[in-house]
Amino acid sequence: MEMLSDRIRNMAESATLAMAAKARELKAKGVNVISLSLGEPDFKTPKHIQEGAKDAIDTEKYFGYPPVNGYLDVRQAISDKFKRENGLAYSADQIVISNGAKQSIANIFQAIINEGDEVVVFAPFWVSYSALIELAGGIPVYVKGDIASDFKVTADQLAAAITPKTKALIFSSPCNPTGSVFTKGELEELSKVVLKHDDLVVIADEIYEHINYTGAHASIGALPGMIDRTVTVNGMAKGFAMTGWRVGYIGAPLWLAKACNKVQGQFTSANCGIAQRAAFTALTSDLGPTYEMSKEYLRRRDLVKDLLDEIPGFKTNIPQGAFYFFPDVSAYFGKSDGETTINTAGDLCIYILDHAQVSLVTGEAFGDDNCIRLSYAASEEDLREAIKRIKESLSKLS
């Protein structure tokens, strides 16, 4: 007998995790599936970070419960990183370390949203934003950029979306799923709108900060008047190839950092102590391995762009960060191979999984019904083979 809450019944499943699960099921049956659905670096965590974790185990000092918001020296290292790399003045007391940036974002929404509050979400958006807002009792209000605008929302669009019920704004830069990156000038225009509204909190998701091909990452919290209005979300997963270590963190106004600490204290308590020591090593060491990974992602981006341009009907922008393409595939809607008719981006993803054995994610989950997301955090061999298979399978649709 199922006795689920309405909250859980109404919650959408993560589309990225669902597609990854389908790919694993096929692989378990012996199907040679190439997975381009998850946003997971294919690099190993750099050796010096691994050694930091081993050293922490050997000292036997980090086996007990850490403070809920994280070890003080790790929070200080994050504070120093924010100042050094981002121009953000968050003290160690304004840092909360969580079990991944996803928990960081969940903590924020639980801390600030009352039932019926609105959160402006720049679309396309990371799949979990909407579910986490709704779980906290809020209402996502989507403001959409399209491929013609490099998927970036303008200040005028933001201004038009704000109502008396608006509590917060959330966006990612570099963006998952589009790879778009806001320039400092574009963030300045957005900040002018924000500063006209005293009770509006900005949640800036900067998890892909180090995978940025523009040469200059800009943080909205570093702009005049914005540090007390901005929560900056970041973590170790993408730039340091530490997805499984589950270390995310925020810098926030003190009142909100304390509230997130309170929320986390009831849900999970602290992040794993050994993972924090690995993060400390990463944060206080040379970023050479991170920069090398970013260079490789850029090389793959250019390779994949050339290959995708050879597929008729695919329209792509040129991502300036992260490791995704988000092509518009609406040219295939209404086409059929005689057995299957493609009506949606979701249909196309299933068709490609069934006929090309490549897993992708529908753009419907990210707020754009015309697109699909492809991760190029994979080997060159897999990328070439996957896009070859996709091209061949789509040639059968007419």
Image (cartoon, rainbow, N blue to C red):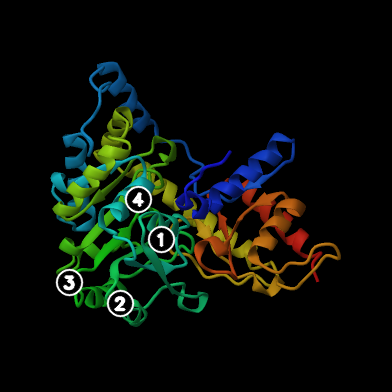
Which is more N-terminal, label 1 or label 4?
Answer: 4
Query: Horizontal and vertical percent for residue 376?
Result: 55, 53
Query: Horizontal and vertical percent for residue 97?
Result: 27, 41
> Secondary structure under badge 1?
loop
Q: CA distance from mark 2 to mark 1?
A: 35 Å
Q: CA distance from mark 4 to mark 1?
A: 29 Å
Dot label at residue 198: 3
Q: Which residue is mark 4?
A: 106
**Dot in front, 3 or 1:** 3
Query: Horizontal and vertical percent for residue 7?
Result: 45, 52
Res. 313 visible in picture: yes
Which is more N-terminal, label 1 or label 3?
Answer: 3
Q: CA distance from mark 3 to mark 1?
A: 34 Å
> Secondary structure under badge 3?
loop
Mark 2, Cα crowd under 10 Å, few <14 / some 14-19 / many 20+, is few
Which is more N-terminal, label 2 or label 4?
Answer: 4
Q: Which residue is mark 1?
A: 213
Query: Horizontal and vertical percent for residue 280?
Result: 26, 35
Q: CA distance from mark 4 to mark 3?
A: 23 Å
Task: Identify which amino acid the numbered label 3 is placed on.
Answer: Asp
Which is more N-terminal, label 3 or label 2?
Answer: 2
Task: Identify which amino acid the numbered label 2 is placed on.
Answer: Thr
Q: Is residue 264 above or below residue 367?
A: above
> Secondary structure under badge 2?
loop
Q: Is residue 398 above or below residue 138?
A: below
Mark 1, Cα crowd under 10 Å, few <14 / some 14-19 / many 20+, is some
Which is more N-terminal, label 3 or label 4?
Answer: 4
Task: Identify which amino acid the numbered label 4 is placed on.
Answer: Ala
**Dot in front, 2 or 3:** 2
Res. 285 visible in picture: no
Q: Is residue 1 above or below residue 123?
A: above
**Dot in front, 4 or 2:** 2
